[in-house]
Image (cartoon, helix red, strand yellow):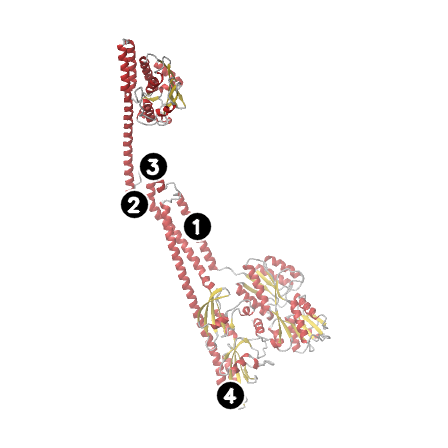
Amino acid sequence: MKNSRKMFILTEGILAILAVIAAFVMFQERNGQERPKVSVIIRDSDASRWSAFKYGLEMAAEDMDVEMFVVSTGEQMTLEEEEELIERELNDGVDAMIIQPVSGAQSKEILEQAGKKVPLMLVEQRASSGGKGLPVTEPDHFAMGKTLASELLKDYDGNLLGKTLGIVWSEENSEAARQRAEGFQSELEGEGARVLWTLCEESAKVPLEDQPEADVIVALDDKSFVRAGNASESHTLHGAVVYGIGNSTEAVYCLDFGSAECLIVPDEFSVGYESLRTVAESFRFFSGEMEGKKVSHTVMRRENIFTKENQEILFTMNQ
Amino acid sequence: MKGKFFGRGSRNHKGIQTTLMITFSVISVSIMLILGIVLYVRFSALSREEIVQSTQKLMEQTGESLEDYLISMRQISDAAYYNVIKESDFSSQSQGIQQGLNLLYEANRDTLRSIAVYNNYGSLMAAEPVAAQKEDPDITRQDWYVQAMEEMENLHFSTPHIQNLFDDDASRYYWVISLSRVVELTQEGNSQLGVLLVDMDYSSISRMMDQINTMNNGQYYYLCDSNGEIIYHRQQIQISDGIRKENSKAAAEYKDGVYDERFEGSRRKVIVNTISYTGWKLVGVIPYSAFTMGMVNIRYFIIMLLLLMCMMLAFINRLVSVRISRPILRLNDSVMEYEAGKKPRIYIGGSKEIRYLGYSIQTSYEQIENLMEEIVKEQNERRKSELDALQSQINPHFLYNALDSITWMIEGGRNDDASYMITQLARLFRISLSKGRTIIRIGDELQHARSYMNIQKIRCRDSFTVTYEVDPEVESCCVVKLVLQPILENAINYGVSGMDDSGRIKVMGSMREGKIYLTVEDNGMGIPEEEVGLLLTDGSRVHKHGSGVGLVNVNNRIQILFGKEYGLQIESEPDEGTKVTICIPAIPYTEENRELLEKGHRLSRDKLTGQAPLPQDRTEEQETKA
């Protein structure tokens, strides 16, 4: 009799616990799980060169069910400003961050500190040269530099003897520009071309237009490519031909209107998509570990701007 | 047998309450489960149907909107051609043509990117809005131009592409869908072919599609042309990059309707709706996971509901089972108590049937008790009559022998001996009678034995000697009367009767471990070993001498009164003698004990009303006797 009562109480207890669990799970489902928040810090966030990157982020956020927002930043961003932004985002309770590191050696330390608190993915370039450190999703800068040089060689039938080059980039201490320049120079080594001058626009006292006359201007980033394209269009480059790397519609326009000869376009959509996807997967699979990725690039010339593949690149740039 | 069927102690048999509870619970839970599953299946089927129907409706509406949009584009194209271009000469009425195109453009600028007219060489004849044409757009090689020229009678809708015609101050590239047709142009009175191009802003279509692509359960819609080329897909770039795939080629083959397909390892429903004029397919995709996603909450709700119902049913089942089983259990308890030796009242209560059962059991028990009492009474009576019968076998026989001896003495002139013998006989009979009692003191039994031996000695002319070695403590205990006399009779007749003056009989009495041992030992001829075993078992043996009552009689009487563990033990060696030992329990002789024994109760030690006499008590008793 006592056993029967015990069994009854036990059964009722187990059923009650199961009912409470079912109710709890039901309400949890109804409330919906909070989506992880990922903050993206990039320099000059409203610039058109980020359009494809941001579209990639949006698509990945939609596919991976992540809440993503891009922090609004100005054209210039110092190390202190970046540190301040990171602190602010951490205080706001973000679950992960995607950051374009500010060029400079000190940046690495700040980012590594932040990386200990939340998953952190770098984009576009490494924090500083040497060592692996934090994961980076970036175009293969060295390969892009090499491709640019090979396109140049192709145009001159492999004969650059006596040709003078001016190399220009916009950001001082840029790791990406350094790698691109390395790639470019490694390909041109022994080909006879001479680098007449190099110019970092951020720190240069003499503008591009006032540089000595060169046969070819090589722009290593989007900003400098558009500037060089515009200068070419306004005939202030002493007839120099512009080659470069860029990822904005302005850069493509320069190519389209003949003010530049060749444009290497990094797949910025993939940089944005893959960086956020990797971060989101680290949440989903609770791995915590992330691996960076190098994305591809495309060679664009005036005659192939409107091919099906390139139209899709333009589509992402137009978003 | 009882245990086998009712299994009171068996763990394999459950109580009636548990059985009822389990049965009710199993039945109710099974019904609930079946009901729950049926409800869930039915509900999910309805929900699935509902989702498909609502998707179809939404797609119909969107299809209509797209058709309206395309019709309006066609109307613009028609208006531009029939109202503006066809009636005018480009050389003389270019202003009017421009104004006409401008009017059309301004009226539809939200959805239009541009209207342009090209001649058969690909040269721009007119365009709205007015913008600088690119340096060398190579019109004649552009798809829309080629298509229009290939099939002149038709209007052609292109897939989305970047407009590569005009310079844009904002350095932007626009996605457009081109509607192109061959038109007849008039220039300087000469008619020539040209192409009218109406570029629709892709954003109008993508906005329409974005509006329906808001589900976050995996359901989505896309638009493709009749060849499966994607016009709109929310993951268009991912598809181009190979990050994901879409089964648009297969969808383009489908006619309007709902299809089940398996793509990339997952099942999904595909709803296809064809857009008029273009042959475009509006495709709705509902992965099967989308059906279950909405059902998860309902699933948990049904589980919770089932659990709560189970709890309630368990409670009700228990109440019902307790109500049904309680009277049966109480009846069972009272029966078990009864069987355990208590005398409770049999429970009478509950329903009519159980009350009747209680009455019936109670009546049965009462009848059983009455019958038992009667049986005990009858048994006692029977035992007493058996004893009486046994004792009555002794008396006539012995009396005959004794009187024969007395007669013989009187005839021989031995009057003193005869007188002595009569005195002994009188004592013997006094004890034999013992006021009709069956149980007497051992002392009296010994006195009886002495009297008997005295008589026998006279009869046998002192041809043997008798010695008595009896512990005094033994004499105050109970014994069945007349047990020694048959043994002594046997000792004389079979032991020492043939021995000339050398016969010895020794009567001994002692108490050990709560038992009394009365021994008669003779030094006679003894009994062969094979006969010793038969002495106590074979009552039908023919006796050569004596009364014929024998040792069987004595043994039976002792065992009837004291139990089977007591009785006679016989040890004999031929030519050395025989030793017969009576073993009985040491029960102090009191009136109460005597009565109990005579009624047939077998007394255990703790039931004795008096203790076995202590040595000093015995001494006092002996002294008193003396």
Q: Residue furthest bottom?
A: B189
Front position in the image: B235 or B569: B569
**Real-space Cα separation, disc 1 to disc 4, in angstroms:** 88 Å
Image coordinates of residue A97 in percent, x first then y, are 58, 61
Front position in the image: B432 or B137: B432
- The part of the image, by quadrant, that contains residue B442 is top left
**Real-space Cα separation, disc 3 to disc 4, in angstroms:** 124 Å
Please tell me which residue is depicted at 40% across the width and 58% down the height of the picture: B37
Image coordinates of residue B329 in percent, x first then y, are 34, 43
Helix, strand or loop under label 3:
helix
Q: Can you identify the residue that label 2 sits on?
A: B351
B144 over B260 or under it: above or below? below
* Quarter of the picture holding the C terminus of chain A: bottom right
Q: Can you identify the residue that label 3 sits on?
A: B339
Query: Horizontally, is A130 left or right of B457 in the view?
Result: right
Q: Mark number for residue B88? A: 4
Q: Chain of mark 1?
A: A
**Real-space Cα separation, disc 4 to disc 2, in angstroms:** 109 Å
Asked whether the residues under the numbered discs 4 and 2 touch, taking CB atoms below 8 Å apart as contact, a structural biologist would say no
**Real-space Cα separation, disc 1 to disc 3, in angstroms:** 39 Å
* Quarter of the picture holding the N terminus of chain A: top left
Share a chain, discs 1 and 4? no
The first of marks 3 and 4 along the sequence is: 4
Question: In the image, which is nearer the foreground, mark 4 or mark 2?
Answer: 2
- The part of the image, by quadrant, that contains residue B408 is top left
**Does any portion of residue B111 appear in the rendered image?**
yes
A185 over B359 or under it: above or below? below
Helix, strand or loop under label 4:
loop
Q: Can you identify the residue that label 1 sits on?
A: A14
**Real-space Cα separation, disc 2 to disc 3, in angstroms:** 24 Å
